[in-house]
Amino acid sequence: MIPDFRGVQLAQRRSWAKANLEKIAPKYAVLWETPFAPKSEPLKITVYSPNWLACAIAGGILPDVQTYLDDSRSMAAFIKKYGKSAPFEYAKVGGAQHAFADPIGAMTEEEAVEYIIQSTLPEDVWKPRHNRQILKIVRCEDVPQDRTYRKLWKLDNLEIEAA
Amino acid sequence: MADKELSDLPDATDLTGAEKFHVVQGGNSREASALQLQKMVEKIGSDIASSAVLGVSDPGSYYTVTGTTGISSFADVRVGKVVTLRFAAALNLSHHATDLILLGGEDITTAAGDIGVFRQYASGDWVCLSYFKAAVSPNMFKANALRHSGEASDRHLQSIAAAWVNFTGTGTIAINDDVNVQSLTDNGTGDYAVLLTNSMANTDYAVTVSAGTFAANAEIESLAAGSFETQIKDVAQTGVLRDAPIVCAIVMGQLSS
């Protein structure tokens, strides 16, 4: 049974989960490209932690993904105001929303992947519509093991079925 | 029994609760049992609505505090009075150097189900003896520093990793194990970004990255509060980026709050 983690710092919740939940091997990987990146930039591959996935599936531990988006916007606003060289501190923007936010309920792994996309990838990758595909969810085992030409990997030249 | 002084009586053995006492109640003599006296001492009082000066009283030793109004002191009952309070909702308990001394000298934000034990140590002055967070297992604790029994001074808890990760950087990248890591992004050959679940408080934290199984130079490309990027370069090939079968990273510093 998951304790009532309201008011408990997220890192502490993860520590509890590390000691009490079994890891769950992720099924999916997210392939994506940065919009308007140089043509030489290969696609990126994002995977997620088995410990984190156990938290997502169990419920009652992770904060709403919106808190990460709010924090990203706070950080972007800080950088816009003070410049990239200004040392960022959460204390200067009223604290990190995600660190003590109330936990949300259990997710399926598919919902967890959506959460990862929104919390990890830049918003301009997953939010706006693009005139070409720049994001694809695939099964981990479908990602090529031979990385000899990794620099050349693009979504339109890797023939992988979407999961 | 008649005409004997109290001091002439033999000492009683342990009370069972059934023994009788003479009490005067409303001007009339009544009989009360030892168990009744015990019940009075341990009485669960009526719920108390939260207020700046919390209205604890006699008799009773256990109360549920309702409402969300902040509490900065307790009512003056009598020196020595001990109460156990169960908080039904989130409110702020304000530390005060004499009126309400809280553990660690810090305010407490209560949560539903939290329990605190308080004692009146002087006229109108209370001290918190212990406080239990309902959500936190007794196996978890909060402290700023730790000291080994053989050491003369404390080590700050920031010297314990805020996050760590061990991942496979070849084939399909995969996180093998971690603490406080959410995701890993393969940006290209030998180039990885790690996202933390609970961000760091600022960008002044420290990351140590190591990689194998070849002579590798692990460089930190960028540090953001919630993530960092590292590149693994092959020393034998004058700094060419190379995927590493094993990459380990340890993050030290202050977590965001």
Image: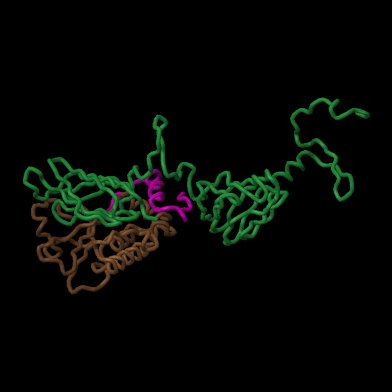
Q: Residue at x 13, y 41 (%)?
A: B214
Is residue B240 toward the left or the right of residue A56 in the image?
A: left
Bounds of the magenta segment:
A1-26
Residue sticking out furthest to the front = B97
* Colouring chosen for the image of the structure: by chain
Q: Residue at x 8, y 49 (%)?
A: B240
**Which lettered chain is shown in brown?**
A
Q: Nearer the viewer, residue A48 or B102?
A: B102
Asked if the stretch drawn in magenta spans residue B50, the answer is: no
Q: Nearer the viewer, residue B150 or B33?
A: B150
Is residue B4 toward the left or the right of residue A31 in the image?
A: right
Asked if the stretch drawn in magenta spans residue A2, the answer is: yes
Vertical relation: B117 (above or below) B92:
above
Where residue A32 sits, quadrant-wise, is: bottom left
Instruction: Give the drawing colour for chain B.
Output: green
Residue sticking out furthest to the right = B3
Q: Residue A51 at what x, y percent from top left? A: 33, 49
Q: Residue at x 59, y 61 (%)?
A: B67
Where residue B29 sits, quadrant-wise, is: top right
Q: Residue at x 18, y 43 (%)?
A: B211
Is residue B171 in view?
A: yes
Q: Residue B79 at what x, y percent from top left? A: 68, 45
Q: Residue A118 at what x, y percent from top left? A: 30, 63
Is residue B107 toward the left or the right of residue B254 in the image?
A: right
Q: Nearer the viewer, residue A21 or A7?
A: A7
Q: Residue A22 at what x, y percent from top left? A: 36, 45
Is residue A136 toward the left or the right of residue B13 in the image?
A: left
